[in-house]
Amino acid sequence: MGGTENFSNKNRLFVTVDIEDWYHIPSVCGSPFSVYKDTDEFFREWLGEYDYLTEPTLRVLKFLGKRNIQATFFVVADVVNHYPGLVEKISENGHEIACHGLEHACKIDPKTKKPLFTTEEFEKRTKEAKKLLENASGQKVIGYRAPNVLIAGWMLDSLEKIGFRYDSSICVNSFYNKSDSDLDGVGTIPYFPIEGGLVPGNKKRDIIEVPWAYLNTFGFRIPVSGGPMLRFLPSGLLKKGLIQSMKEGPAVMYFHPIDISNKSFPKIGKGRPFYWMIKGDVVEKRIVSLIDAFNKSGVNFCNLRDLMGIMI
């Protein structure tokens, strides 16, 4: 497959964590169907508690630190302003800081996949996000994950221009496609995408795409990297899919600290009435059991910055 031959290192698991709070989801903020246009409007109007993120993030740092795992944390940049010291704390614990957008706004329409921002607006906002995260963490930010993993080829071109070295947003599966491409030829192995698109190309670029893991069973592809699937699918199925992906090359696992929050979130937002039905301690135990099982089997845990070493 074009553009994947340099990334066949097997038995490696990239542990990634998305730092966003409950109001960052598209039913509440930053999408064409959200209650609030953006997080600026949310903070102007919201009068209740908003920080459901800090406490579970500290728990994540604790269980990763206990196992000596250095992960990649994809951080929504406005966290720097609204959660003083949190990004600094993550960085001080030895984890990579990567970018999850400025305010977690959708960059393409979830239904039509048409751009919601001009290229210039996207680049300006992403540069601002990158600078915020770099100033807070003291790290050079080289990784990106699209908010709501809604990704388009033109976005990768802009990310490369801005100075990002990798993106990890593509989830190939049989249920949905959150990109503006048919993803023909995309598997689970990192690859160099074509210019202006998301499919693998035949020439080296300054940016690579790190797609997520899936379980291929009878031609049906089930997303198993994590997120909502980590909350709703049995851990045995997730483990099986991650193992299958690691037989091909390095695999991506991800979760959100708010997945393990034991608090009840505010009842606002359009649709998704069962979205947070399963979370809290049961999900934390599931994450930890998966990590411990892979640890016992000798899997090499990495952050995505380590991928740059594979490229050389």
Image: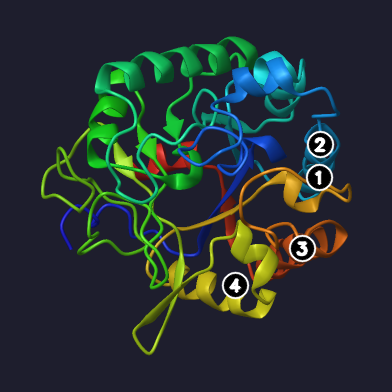
Q: Which of marks 2 and 4 is in front?
A: 2
Q: Position of residue 127 (x, y in %)?
A: 41, 15
The colour scheme is: rainbow
Q: What element carries label 4?
A: helix
Q: Residue at x 65, y 64 (%)?
A: 230
- In the image, farthest residue toward the bottom: 218
Whole-angstrom CA distance, mark 2 to mark 4, is 26 Å
In the displayed structure, 37 sits above or below 205; it is above
Instruction: Of the two numbered discs 2 and 3 on the same chain, state the one appearing first in sequence.
Output: 2
Which residue is the site of mark 3? 277
Residue 62 relative to residue 273: left or right: right
Q: Where is residue 215 in the image (x, y as percent from the top left)?
A: 46, 76
> Callout 2: few (<14), some (14-19), or many (20+) C-alpha neighbours within 10 Å?
some
Residue type at numbered disc 2: Tyr
In the displayed structure, 112 sits above or below 185; it is above
The quadrant the N terminus occupies is: bottom left
Which residue is the site of mark 4? 238
Whole-angstrom CA distance, mark 2 to mark 3, is 16 Å
Mark 1 and mark 2 in contact? Answer it, CB < 8 Å: yes
Whole-angstrom CA distance, mark 3 to mark 1, is 11 Å
Quarter of image, res 27: top right
Which residue is the site of mark 1? 265
Mark 2 and mark 3 in contact? Answer it, CB < 8 Å: no
Mark 1 and mark 4 in contact? Answer it, CB < 8 Å: no
Instruction: Of the two numbered discs 1 and 4 on the same chain, state the one appearing first in sequence.
Output: 4
